[in-house]
Amino acid sequence: MKSEGNVPARVASLVVAGVHKRLGPNEVLKGVSFEVRPGEVVALLGPSGSGKTTLLRAIAGLDHPDAGRISLGEQVLFDAASGARLAAERRNLGLVFQSYALWPHRTVFENVAYGLVLRRTPAGELRRKVEEVLRRLGLAALAARHPHQLSGGQQQRVALARAIVYDPQLLLLDEPLSNLDAQLREDARAWLRELIEQLRTGAVCVTHDQVEALAIADRVLLLDQGRIVQAGTPEELYAAPATLFAAEFMGSNDRLPGTVREVRGERVRLGGEGWELWGTAKGDLRPDQGAVGVIRIGRVGLREGAGPDVLSAELDTTLYLGERWEYVLHAGELRFRVWHPTAPAGRGPCFAHFPPEALWVFPAGLL
Amino acid sequence: MSRSVKWSVVGIVLTLSTAHARAADAAPATAPDVLAAAEKEGKLVIYSTTDSASAGALLKDFAALHPGIQVEYDDINSTEVYNRFVSEAAAGAASADLLWSSAMDLQIKLVADGYAQPYASPEARALPQGSVWKDQAYGTTFEPIVFVYNKRLLKPEEVPQSHADLIKLLRANPERFRGKLTSYDPERSGLGFLLITEDAKHDPAFAETEKAYGSVAVKLYTSTGAMLERIASGEHLIGFNMIGSYAALRQRKDPSLGIAYPRDYMLVMSRVALLPKASRHPNAAKVFLDHLLSQRGQQALAGAALFAIRSDVAGEQTAAALNRSAGASLKPIPVGPPLLEYLDQTKRLDFLKRWQQALGTK
Amino acid sequence: MLITAGAVLLPLGLVLYQSFLDAPFFQPSAKISLSAYRFVLADSDFRRALGTTALVALGMTAVAVPFGSLMAFFLVRTDLPGRGWLEPLVLVPIFLSPVVLGFGYVVSVGPVGFFSLMVKQVLGAIPWDLYSLKSLVLIAGLTHIPHVYLYTSTALRALGSDVEEAASVAGAGTARIALTVSLPLVWPAIVYSGVLVFFLGFELFGLALILGDPEGLLVLSTYLYKLTNRLGVPSYQLMAVVAVAIVAVAFPLVALQRRLLRMSARFVTVRGKGAARRPLPAGRWRWVGFGLVVAWLGVTVVVPVSGVFLRAVVSTWGEGVQLREVLTLDNFRELAGYRNLVRGVLNTAGLGVVGGALAVACYTAVGLAAHRWRSGWARVLDYLVMIPRGMPGLVAGLAFLWVFLFFRPLAPLRATVFSIWLAYTVVWLAYGTRLVSSALLQVSPELEEAGLTVGASTARLTRDVTLPLIRFGLLGSWLLIFMIFVREYSTGVYLLGPGSEVIGSLIVSLWASGAIDLVSALAVIDILLVGAGLALALRFGVRLHEE
């Protein structure tokens, strides 16, 4: 359950307004605006090239946008109009790099303590704080080691410790889980979420992994080619995507390209060579228009026989995924996948049921 | 106490050996008011091409006589002396009080360009004719220009006794001497050029001489040391237009070197001293010049194989000894305007062109 | 930045200005004219010298770069036997004066060299000609290998083993790894050092003088000698033209260098994920590599140094001389009588150690500025640092004299050690800065950015993060500069005075008076001193590598 809890007074809202950024000939950010409320975890989700890392670096102050405004509470971090630019080292934010960027010539303790050293924290208090953070992240035994002596997961935690030890106003994370092996990733996202909740600062997390974004964030901002194409809670993004891009980016989907055969109010008949199904229209659709149907694989079920909203399909192959089986089927020209708890009985035809309310039909060419 | 005085063991030995003679030597005849002013100035800067080791005895003697005058002795090559002095003079910055260089033509040029102040040194009376110009340029040594050869590898009958001898030798045995003859490169060494032009004046068969050099592929260098080294080792057999003082000094330590004094004509060069007009310590400079030209100063030079120019100095490396042994064949290069002849660009380049043609290199 | 520009452009500007006059610039009668250019460009000797110089430079680079980088790989990245003591020896040629080195070769393998004579007895003739162009190129190349080595080894040290191990696992042998992984990763260091060596070839003097003179091989710096005396009176405008010509070569060189390093982000290898360094097994290349290094040492160090040592302990040498009969320690005894010697040695050591450290501090500042400001300034800086070295020693010495004479604010400093130090520092700017730059290239910008986000100011960051990460580059730079300052002479020749003489000036002064024996003795002392200094430094922590 995502909670907001009691936030201390010092933590403020991050407001990003109309940020543009050009890198060479490319316009990487084309006017991005959003807000991060105190204590909120926001995920910047998108494919590579969508500008999410650029945006994060702009918030951190490592790169400056060409236009727009970024402020944290009362403090203006960047304002193109007035020329205000606060240097990165004065923003008091915590940034965890994708590559961790640990200083190889310093021990774990020194890496973490550096932020406090810069803030002239007295020796006793410094030691206490560093040890506490290390303990919290399970790194107490590694304090005297050097980064090259640590595993990837340990290095990640050191990077995190370094970023939070001085109680930053806002935590910025660049692909925090992408460098971990799959097994670690699942554990990591749980304690990361827990940690951030405990810290009660806001966090902005950049990721290309939608599972990660859904799991960690209170709100997800989906970016594509420098723009926010949809913003909302994870549930909203998952269950109610506004565009084809959003629909396809989230979850595991079956994609049904075809033509609109018929429109009946909200329902639309989508068909292709050898198949036809009813779905829910998302956007303006007319008959004979090209369209793409998207449905979460999990919503496709197998039936005993033919029926309404059922396709008869041939089985191409099956994959065992541990908890379930994935059936790769084709009906006419359409290829799609279905999940099922058990293996197929034989090689005979399968009957796949597509609930119309779960099959979103978008106009083709609208991303 | 004077600074920068390099010691030469040889210098000390010779100094000691003539000490009894010097004890009786009178001090140089400098005017007393000049002396007094010099003591007040207390310092003297010299740019010289004579290396500190060879000048050691001279400087030590000067320090003994004038402990109150600190001598700063900068030992650099002739081009550097010229460059540095001229640049500093142009900037009006502190420079030398005395220039002592073996580049005779450059020194005369400086005088001709008005850089020197005239000073009639009382010691100059004892110098031979043609060694002082306008009381501004003083020849201070009498160094013969000789042949140097490798004693081990050259047969006694092959040692050239004259320039004509050398040419005959080369013509008779071109293969033996191919690549084994060496001298200064007139194109790259000012002194080398000067000596060759003097040869052209005194050698009746100079055109033939040039060709003879070319026929054995003479090896030309800029550095005395490089040449002496190569003669001593046997890489080359004979060097001509070599500076007698360097050869004599080297011969003291190295048994491989032989010196032959040409009998048909023997050039004599002189290191020229001048006192710059814009000197900061003019009187100290005058005192030093007097000392350099005095009998005791010249004795010190002779001790360092620098061939004293005064006639009343005892020893082998002196003008007196040379005059006795060579007499009329000595052709001292006069300290005066004739040295400027080949500083004229066109003349110089013409001469060099003819030289290169004769050598077969152009 | 501005200071650097000023320090570089001042002497160079003077030289450039001088080249367009028809007389020394400080003479009131001097007029603007192209006569100097016309004279030089029409001079066939100039064209000949230019051609020879270009060949030598090219040949040198072709020899030094491949061998230098391979040697660096073997000594730094593999477990080659004996690499502990081989490494310091590699740097020996750098601190030998080229004139002395050249003469060492003459004494040992010249036409009547002791080694040549031995070979002649066995084979009947000497199969090599020390004075040929080939030999000059070869020796110049071999003696410049340490420069390439120093750059490449510093860069190789900073590599983590992970990239090499990946290749190893994929099936690549050590040789393949060297050629396809390790060396390509230190490409910037190789490029920098290659360009530098090529440029040094244009400025080559000592070796060309000793080894080129006998056959009349003319290079640009010895051609300058001709110009000095051609017209009787030193003509600065002609010399300036030659200097300008050499400096002009710098521009296409730097452009080439920039092009070769365009994608320098590829070379970031010091990242936040620390990787341990483990040496690669040299395997079957073990003894080949070892042999290669030893052979190089033999030709480049043992041969000339033995020549120098020999010359120092004999009264005469050459054909027909029985070595046993002429051995003596007189040369050293004579040298001991020189009071200036001790002072000269101390001055030189001081200039090298302290002056070198200060110079490296300057170079680091310049390198950091270039690293941080990746803009038009950085490009200008690239050119700026290169061009001072374009001035041959003869011209550089003059240029700096003039700067300190005619540039009012600096005039009072002329007679101090500062002037000499400044001249040296500016002239060797390219060297020191490049070492620092290539080290900086290997540091991931993220490491610095991490420092920023944690709250470090740029100054703090430099102190706590950047500098420690490039410490090997800094040390390497300091060592190199130390050795260069120790043997430098011509750049400060007009600024030296009694009391500030250095070993270089002592050697030249002795050489000019023909006392080659004393020069050799002094060179022996010089070698022993620097060698001792080097050994001490390495022992007590100025480590070239970390363990």
Image: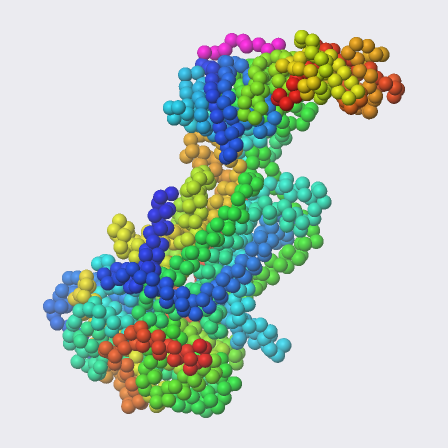
The answer to whether residue C105 shows anywhere in this view is yes
From the image, give the main secondary structure of the stretch colored magenta.
Answer: loop
Task: Look at the image and tell me in which quarter the N terminus of chain C lies.
Answer: top left
Residue visible at 32% across and 66% down in the picture: C235
Left or right of residue B284: residue B308? right
Q: Check if residue A5 falls in the magenta segment.
A: yes
Instruction: Please name the residue shown 34% across and 83% down the image.
Output: B199
Q: Where does the image place residue A141, in percent across and percent down from the top left? A: 59, 26
Total marks in image: 0
- Taking the magenta stretch, the answer to whether it contains residue B199 is no
Q: Nearer the viewer, residue A17 or A263?
A: A263
The residue positioned 37% from the left and 61% from the top of the image is C241
Residue at 39% x, 66% y: name it: C40
Q: Is residue C499 above or below residue B55?
A: above
Residue nearer the viewer, C88 or A181: A181
Image colouring: rainbow
x, y percent for residue B71 = 24, 64
Residue B59 rendering spot, x and y as whole percentages: 26, 69
Magenta range = A1-9
